[in-house]
Amino acid sequence: VGAAAAETRFRKAQSLFEETLGKEHIYVGMILFERARRLDRLHNDAEAEECYRGSLTVARKTVQLQHPRIRLLAREYGQFLVRHDRAEEAISIWEDFLKAQETRFGQESPFYADALVSFSAMQSTMGNDDKAEQLLRRALGIMKKTARPIRLTYLEAECDLGLLLLDKKEKIEEAESLLRNASVGVEERFGRVSRETADLQVGIARAAIEQGEMEEAEALLRTAETIGGSLIGRDRRLALDYVYWWKSRLFRRLKRPVAAAEAIQSMAELWPSDS
């Protein structure tokens, strides 16, 4: 189904729900959110924001932002606002959502931790790495004390914090430990041959390079390359592009210019100029 046809169907569904359930029913809010995401991807900014705003209004009136899945709306609308240089509005939405989660579940709940992890991603996008790190550490602290943390959120927090520390070039040993811990759960969750597993292998290799462990880094990158080569389509290209970027850096560090040039050439082949 094309984008235009899908939008027509969503509009029709929204109209039917509004006629039968009323304009402020939670199902109407859900449809508005799906429309907003699609319109956002199509760069129809005016209509996308109208739908985001409508969905948020419904969420405020029906569940007072207290349902955990409102996190998805806060994340997508927040990123939309940040891209349009309206970061203060995005932060305000997140503050309201976090307050609602605290009211319903308390500050020590896995749902509150889940919200903190998503908020950290937006802060990182805004360049607020210190704030993002603070949020991730707080979320991990909550989940470590929780009997039943949200497993996928825990893995996401470990990965995000590990990669953030690498980007900041701080606490490299801690970053490696976080990524190695996460790699076990990620492989169990997504499988050995997956983009997520390949990305973590590259992340651990980055930590190894920063610590001068070049042989370890090369072995990890070769593993990631094998995994990436087993994937198909766009995921394969994305995974291998990342691998070759770090292979070229590794080989430059090892003063192997021919190998570095080969890695760069492989990257160019993966991303042809007309793609």
Image (cartoon, helix red, strand yellow):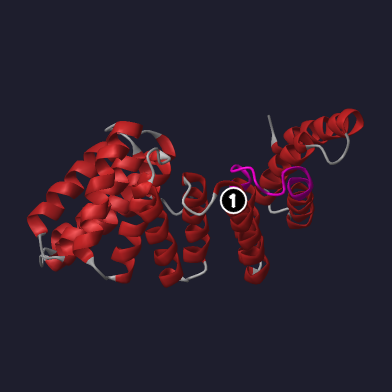
Q: Looking at the rendering, which quadrant does residue 212 occupy?
A: bottom left
Asked if residue 39 lies left or right of residue 224, the reply is: right
Residue 137 screen position, x and y as percent: 37, 60
Residue 111 screen position, x and y as percent: 51, 45
Q: Is residue 42 above or below residue 95?
A: above
Q: Is residue 9 visible?
A: yes
Residue at the extreme right of the image, as rendered: 19
Q: Which range of residues does the magenta coloring cover?
A: 58-71
At x 19%, y 42%, the residue is 223
Asked if residue 188 lies left or right of residue 100, the reply is: left
Secondary-structure class at tag 1: helix
Asked if residue 218 lies left or right of residue 75, the reply is: left
- Name the residue carrying label 1: 101
109 drawn magenta = no
Residue 164 screen position, x and y as percent: 35, 63
Q: Nearer the viewer, residue 9 or 53?
A: 53
At x 32%, y 70%, the residue is 168
At x 45%, y 69%, the residue is 131
Q: Quadrant of the N terminus?
A: top right
